[in-house]
Structure formats: C-alpha cells, structure tokens
Image (cartoon, rainbow, N blue to C red):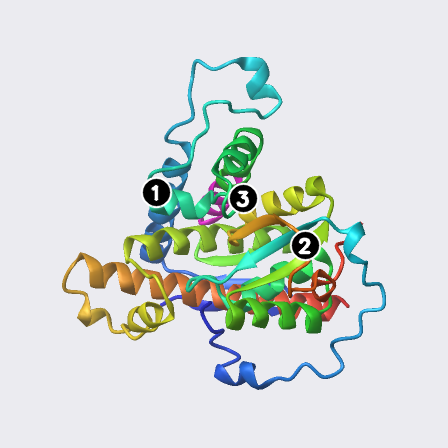
Amino acid sequence: MTPSVAYGTDIDQRTDTAQQTSTDVLTAPDIPWNLVIWNDPVNLMSYVSYVFQSYFGYSEAKSHKLMMEVHKKGRSIVAHGSKEQVEQHAVAMHGFGLWATVEKAASGNETPGKGGRQRG
Amino acid sequence: MAKAFKYGLKGITGHLEPAERDLLRGLLDDVISMLESDVRENEDPLAALIGLDMDAKKPSDRALLRLLPNVMKDDDAGSLEFRQLTERSVRESKIGALKATALGLDKNDLVLTGEEAARWSMALNDVRLVLAERLDIRDEADADHIHSMQDWSQAEDVESYLALVYNFTTWLQESLVQSMISARQAQS
C-alpha cells in the first residue's frame, strides 16, 4: 500500500495494545468462508482503513490493525461468514477498488476470529 | 494550483483550477470507457434486468482485471461463475461513481457532501489503479520510484507525465480521505 502522506512512516510504529479485545469470536465450524484483502502498492493506507471503518463499521483501531496486517503480511482476513455473505462483501470491496478474494476457512494457522465479525 | 481537500464548517471543501479539472475529467472518462467498452447491446433483456451477464469473462487487460479481479485465488471456474452473476453490478457502481465525480467537476471551488466525497474517493482510487497498471507499478519499490517524481519540469515523455499525473491524483485522494476521516471523527 501507499503510505499516507499525512501520517508519515511512523504509522508503522503504532502498537496493537488494547486493540485485541474481541469478545465475540466465532468458532471455526460456524465460519466456513473468509473474506481476504490482499496488499497492493497503489491503494492508500488511509483509504483502506477508511473502507474498513465505513463499510464494516469496525473501529478506527481495528481498521488500522487490519490494514497494517494487509500491508505487512500481504493479506488479511477481514470478515467471515457464509459463502453468500463473504461474496457480497467481495462485491462491495471490488466496488471500492480493494483487491478482495473469498476462500474456504481452512483449519490452518490463520484464525479467522482475528479479523472480527462482519456487521449485520 | 489545486488546494488539498479539507474538512471544516462548510463540510469537505477543495479547489481545482480549470486545467486540473479538465485533466481529471479526461482520466475519469478514460476509466468509464474502459468499463463500458464491452457492454453488449443485443443481450437478453431479462438477464440484463436482473444483473446477469453470462458472457462475462476474465478481462485480458491488466488494468481492467485490477478493477474487476477474480474472486477466488485458485478457482477460475468459480471466479467466472461469480463474475457472470456480479460483474455487471460492480461495473455499474464504478461507472456511477466515476460519472458523478466527472459531473461534479463543474466549478473551481468544490464543496462535497459525505456521499459525494465517498464517490469521489472511489473514483479517484479507480483512476489511480488504472494509471498504476499503465506505469507498471508492481511493488512498493516501483511505487516509491514513481512517487519520487514531483517536478513538472521532469515531464519529458509520456511515462514521466503519467507519473506526475498519478502523483497528483494520489495527493488529491489522500487529502480527500483525510478529510473524510476528520468528518467521521467530528460526527462521532
């Protein structure tokens, strides 16, 4: 992603303290599909974070954390749900210009709960 | 000179000179025609009505593919099926935002509502995605290289001109998004 001019590079220095309290994490069998956002060198960090806030209704802190995960790890699971739900999210993300894919939630290393739940 | 967008008492405001508005309008029109290019005329009207497009296929143009990406990483058949069901509506929403933004470029002093700002940010993002493909921006190093070109006296060829246009659009979108974030914070 392209760093936000106004924030400068020290945006990376923000830590994740106090941002990891998610009390309503669903368990794996209930969440068969993930919405994945992929990093690209074009989308602004501020824009990606804004989309997470405005579309999913996530807090600023959570949106920032997910955006940084996309930026640093190359991808992040930002929502999960039924196939139909995540596909609907993917259509919206493509509308915003974010590079989104859907995938079956595997029993791999990535825990979908980290990405939180979607609105509605 | 353009002024960065800012959030204040009047809402989200910005300022663009006529030449800058012409430039942006041209860029927006280019993306609109890319997205409209293969909309077929003699298609099944019922299918069109409910948003289906059984002729949709993965775009061969990289820029168009970036605007309309596959929805599954390793499943071309599944992605194609999804494309047939949804691509038309993604195209239409993008075209809608691009056209609304182009129409809004009718005066130098801009005052945007929250909804207008949201459409502008989507439209500017799509413009940047297309320019980035034309500039072959593949990774962060490429992006940094392009970003380092800020001096219009450097515009010697098509590529350096495109790079400067890309940086202008980036700057404009960044100020707009920061204004939208400020507006959001003010409302909460």
Chain under callout 3 = B
Q: Is residue B103 on the magenta stretch?
A: yes
**How far is mark 1 from mark 3, CA to CA?**
25 Å
**Do the residues bearing badges 3 and 2 touch, measured as CB atoms within 8 Å?**
no
Determine if residue B113 is in view.
Answer: no
At mark 1, the secondary structure is helix
Residue indicated by mark 3? B71
Q: Amino acid at mark 1?
A: Asp
B53 lies left or right of B166? right
Q: Amino acid at mark 2?
A: Tyr
Q: Identify the residue shown where x is 42% and y is 21%.
A: B40
Labels 1 and 2 within one chain: no
Q: Nearer the viewer, residue B81 or B21?
A: B81
Q: Nearer the viewer, residue B70 or A28?
A: A28
Q: Which quadrant of the structure image shows residue B58?
A: top left
**How far is mark 3 from mark 2, CA to CA?**
18 Å
Residue indicated by mark 2? A55
Circle 2 packing at 10 Å, graded few (<14), some (14-19), many (20+), is some
Q: Amino acid at mark 3?
A: Val
Q: Identify the residue shown where x is 74% and y is 63%.
A: A113
Q: Of helix, strand and loop, which mostly describes the magenta segment?
A: helix
Circle 3 packing at 10 Å, graded few (<14), some (14-19), many (20+), is many
